[in-house]
Image (cartoon, helix red, strand yellow):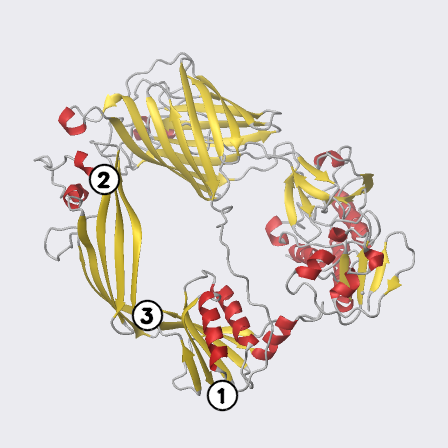
């Protein structure tokens, strides 16, 4: 526990230090004596000095006096605890701790203020030119050309920066001391950001530096970079020590800092192709899965085609440890049914769902391991279970697994579960009913080993695959398939960040080709062009606001702050703003804008602003802000002397009576037209059926709590005339539901729904909605009778 506390303190110390700190004292490289500037009222008065015109601002650091005192206290406390920890250890561990302690002791720290110092940015950015008050120190200089090795290494020190050289190469010839993390480095940027860089044999990528803009640091655990042009150290924010597990007896505080001077820009060359999709969808080789996972948030749309099957799949990486895949398979050698009048010449379609869970991640010695199942909850045409391990070695990524079901039909090894029970030696290979989930056969029957390797070629977009599979293809739904070889080979070419093309040769006699389209939900950013926040330009107002002023405020509250039906009220020394947020999902943005709007024309004597957000005419929450505190923030507080904004969220407060009140009259009627696409996938008559139309919807607020809604649908085009399922089989006990859809779409125009809702708080925090509705394409369930909801 003590060591975790020390490591956390170490990171806090680094996060509050800098390689230098201004009434302003300015240190420039090459000048032994600092210069003192005493007339800088704002930041631009300092960074706009002509004598600093040649400075390299990405590496510049400004520190505040009191923050520097705090940072140096943290440094001394850290050194003391490191000394105590070193006394507890012996041998190599003690030597490593003492080496680290001496390096940290040599670092001179300061209380860095995180503010952009580039004069061009300071001039134009909002609140980018704060006042200066007290004593500061500024360190600036030209772009350095040295790299500094720092941490648990045999020879810390500086090296010349070499363009194009990757991170790991700077450590060649270095011996790692006890406890050093072998697998990762960190790249630390001048603005305090840090980035993890893999450098071990199993995860190394081409991570290079370009002497332009940022720090470039290589370390294992403890992130600390030194400026090559001087002995003052800068700081950044880094991963939580508790998460990285540093400062344990078995894994001592590991520091391998390769710091390209403050002038260096860390740049990642195009990443390897990385985990790619298999034939069935989901990360894998060709026919077999691997333990790899796609990046969290990734969605892949896949198509694969050979003589017997077409695979259409969508794979989603919901969590770092969970992969899910939905797949449709077109069996080209089978008809949908033997009745031509029912399904025509359409080929058989099968729907399946797959899941894969990561058991543990790869480390220096351990492989990544995952367990998964294919075709669960379906007909079981391709049902399989597996456990698989993956281990990388440079550009090679090896995998080895054990499979059951479709992955294990060759039975090249004994089922290990048979030793537990003979029941595991048998598996029901009959096809199941669609929609059923049956786990009784999981991990039953023959088992087979499978595996393979992926190779990342020197040509970055191209990756090659070789696999050995455990399926003998003698029980395929498409019929017995000839297999001349159990080895499959393939290649994947990344056309762009969002598209791959695949080509493979499988079973020794079959070509497979396909395409993968991908995106990542974490990377999606809406192309949203919003109005800027109102500038803070206060105008003095009397206690009673003028009508023209209030009209302007209400308009801005509606269109800039996103508050529908805004209302402004004044009672005593409090101004109330009320409305429904319809523009910003993050309501805090609307609060910021609303506060600025009212602050620009604030009535005299107002000390508190309360913004209450409504929903369906019912108050939800109030944000209360102190006017004096908000004024200080909007005007800009002195650098290094910032105070928290006095603001809090409280239960909704709506005054019953006020001295002043204005509002924009709410329209009680709303009407809108929307395009509608209704669709069905996987039907016997046609794989894809659709209906395209327009929906007209009208809302009427009868009272403040009673809302009535109605919608009318108008058909534009559909192909449901092909839908000929009108009479279910006589032996079927399943009531018809969606198969009534043809009757619903026969009318080109119909009432879609009529609805009335009454909204009121049932208790303090429970919203009650009374509902009465009628729908033109729904069948309502009636208690005690056989009925169902259709849609």
Q: CA distance from mark 2 to mark 1?
A: 63 Å
Residue 635's spot in the image, x, y percent? Answer: 65, 72
Mark 2 vs mark 1: in front: 2
Mark 2 Cα within 10 Å, few/some/many (few <14, many 20+)?
A: some
Q: CA distance from mark 1 to mark 3?
A: 30 Å
**Point 40% across, 77% down: residue:** 663
**Point 39% across, 26% down: residue:** 304
Task: Say the numbered circle drawn on residue 713.
Answer: none
Q: Which residue is mark 2?
A: 718
| Residue 288 visible somewhere in the drawing | no
Comparing 300 with 259, the one in front is: 300
Q: Which residue is mark 3?
A: 667
Residue 190's spot in the image, x, y percent? Answer: 71, 51
Task: Say the numbered circle drawn on residue 572.
Answer: 1
Mark 3 Cα within 10 Å, few/some/many (few <14, many 20+)?
A: few
Taking the image as shown, residue 585 lies to the left or right of residue 740, namely right
Above or below: residue 513 compared with residue 710: above
Comparing 699 with 282, the one in front is: 699
Taking the image as shown, residue 383 lies to the left or right of residue 156, namely left
Q: CA distance from mark 3 to mark 2?
A: 36 Å
Tag 3's secondary structure? loop
Tag 2's secondary structure? strand
Residue 581's spot in the image, x, y percent? Answer: 42, 66
**Point 46% across, 37% down: residue:** 518
Comparing 679 with 729, the one in front is: 679
Tag 1's secondary structure? loop
User: In the image as oriented, which residue stretches furthest toward the top?
Assistant: 484
Mark 1 vs mark 3: in front: 3
For the N terminus, the image quarter is bottom right
């Amino acid at each position: 526990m003590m060591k975790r506390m020390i490591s956390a303190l170490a990171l806090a110390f680094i996060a509050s230090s800098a390689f230098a700190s201004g009434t302003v004292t300015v240190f420039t490289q090459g000048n032994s004596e600092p210069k003192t500037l005493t007339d800088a009222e704002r930041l631009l008065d300092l960074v706009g000095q002509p004598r600093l015109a040649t400075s390299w601002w990405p590496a510049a650091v400004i520190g505040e006096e009191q923050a520097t005192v705090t940072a140096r206290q943290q440094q001394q406390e850290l050194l003391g605890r490191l000394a105590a920890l070193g006394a507890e250890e012996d041998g190599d561990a003690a030597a490593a701790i003492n080496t680290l302690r001496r390096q940290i002791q040599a670092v001179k720290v300061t209380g860095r203020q995180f503010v952009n110092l580039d004069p061009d940015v300071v001039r134009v950015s909002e609140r980018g030119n704060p006042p200066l008050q007290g004593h500061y120190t500024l360190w600036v200089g030209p772009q350095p050309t040295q790299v500094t090795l720092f941490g648990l290494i045999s020879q810390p020190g500086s090296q010349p920066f070499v363009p194009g050289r990757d991170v790991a190469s700077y450590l060649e010839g270095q011996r790692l001391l006890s406890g050093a993390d072998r697998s990762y480095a960190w790249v630390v940027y001048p603005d305090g950001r840090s980035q993890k860089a893999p450098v071990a044999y199993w995860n190394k990528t081409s991570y290079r530096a370009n002497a332009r803009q940022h720090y470039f640091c290589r370390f294992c655990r403890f992130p600390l970079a030194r400026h090559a042009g001087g002995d003052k150290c800068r700081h950044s924010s880094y991963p939580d020590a508790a998460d990285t597990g540093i400062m344990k007896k078995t894994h001592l505080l590991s520091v391998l800092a390769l710091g390209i001077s403050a002038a260096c820009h860390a740049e990642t060359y195009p990443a390897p192709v990385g985990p790619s999709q298999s034939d069935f969808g989901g990360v894998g080789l060709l026919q077999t899965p691997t333990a790899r996972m796609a990046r969290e948030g990734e969605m892949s749309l896949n198509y694969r085609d050979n003589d017997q099957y077409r695979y259409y799949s969508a794979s989603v990486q919901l969590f770092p440890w969970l992969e899910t895949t939905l797949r449709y398979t077109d069996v080209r050698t089978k008809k949908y049914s033997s009745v031509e009048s029912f399904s025509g010449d359409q080929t058989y379609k099968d729907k399946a769902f797959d899941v894969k869970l990561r058991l543990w991640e790869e480390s220096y010695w351990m492989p990544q391991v995952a367990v998964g199942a294919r075709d669960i909850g379906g007909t079981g045409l391709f049902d399989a279970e597996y456990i698989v391990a993956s281990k990388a070695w440079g550009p090679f990524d090896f995998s080895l697994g054990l499979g059951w079901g479709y992955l294990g039909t060759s039975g090249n090894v004994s089922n290990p579960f048979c030793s537990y029970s003979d029941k595991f030696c048998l598996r029901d290979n009959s096809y199941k009913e669609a929609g059923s989930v049956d786990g009784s056969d999981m991990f039953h029957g023959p088992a087979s080993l499978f595996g393979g390797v992926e190779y990342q070629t020197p040509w970055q977009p191209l990756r090659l695959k070789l696999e050995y599979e455990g399926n003998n293809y003698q029980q395929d739904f498409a019929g017995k398939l000839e297999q001349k070889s159990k080895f499959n080979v393939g290649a994947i070419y990344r056309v762009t960040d969002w598209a791959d093309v695949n080509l493979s040769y499988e079973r020794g006699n079959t070509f497979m080709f396909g395409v993968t389209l991908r995106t990542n939900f974490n990377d999606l950013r809406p192309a949203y062009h919003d109005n800027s926040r109102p500038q803070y330009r206060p105008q003095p107002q009397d206690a009673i606001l003028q009508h023209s002023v209030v009209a302007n405020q209400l308009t801005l509250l509606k269109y800039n702050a996103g508050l529908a039906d805004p209302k402004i009220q004044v009672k005593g020394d409090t101004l109330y703003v009320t409305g429904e947020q319809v523009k910003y999902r993050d309501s805090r943005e609307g609060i910021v804008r609303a506060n600025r709007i009212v602050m620009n024309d604030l009535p005299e004597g107002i000390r508190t602003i309360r913004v209450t957000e409504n929903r369906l005419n019912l108050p939800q929450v109030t944000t209360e802000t102190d006017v004096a505190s908000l004024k200080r923030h909007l005007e800009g507080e002195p650098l290094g002397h910032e105070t928290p904004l006095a603001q809090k969220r409280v239960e909704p407060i709506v005054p019953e009576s006020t001295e002043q009140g204005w509002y924009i009259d709410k329209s009680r009627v709303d009407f809108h037209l929307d395009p509608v696409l209704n669709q069905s996938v996987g039907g016997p008559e046609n794989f894809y059926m659709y209906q395209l139309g327009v929906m007209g919807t009208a809302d009427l607020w009868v009272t403040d709590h009673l809302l009535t809604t109605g919608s009318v649908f108008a058909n534009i085009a559909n192909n449901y005339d092909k839908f000929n399922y009108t009479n279910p089989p006589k032996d079927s006990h399943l009531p018809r539901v969606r198969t009534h859809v043809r009757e619903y779409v026969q009318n080109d125009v119909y009432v879609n729904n009529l609805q009335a809702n009454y909204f009121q708080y049932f208790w303090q925090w429970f919203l009650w909605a009374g509902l009465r509705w009628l729908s033109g394409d729904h069948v309502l369930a009636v208690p005690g009778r056989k009925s169902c909801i259709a849609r």
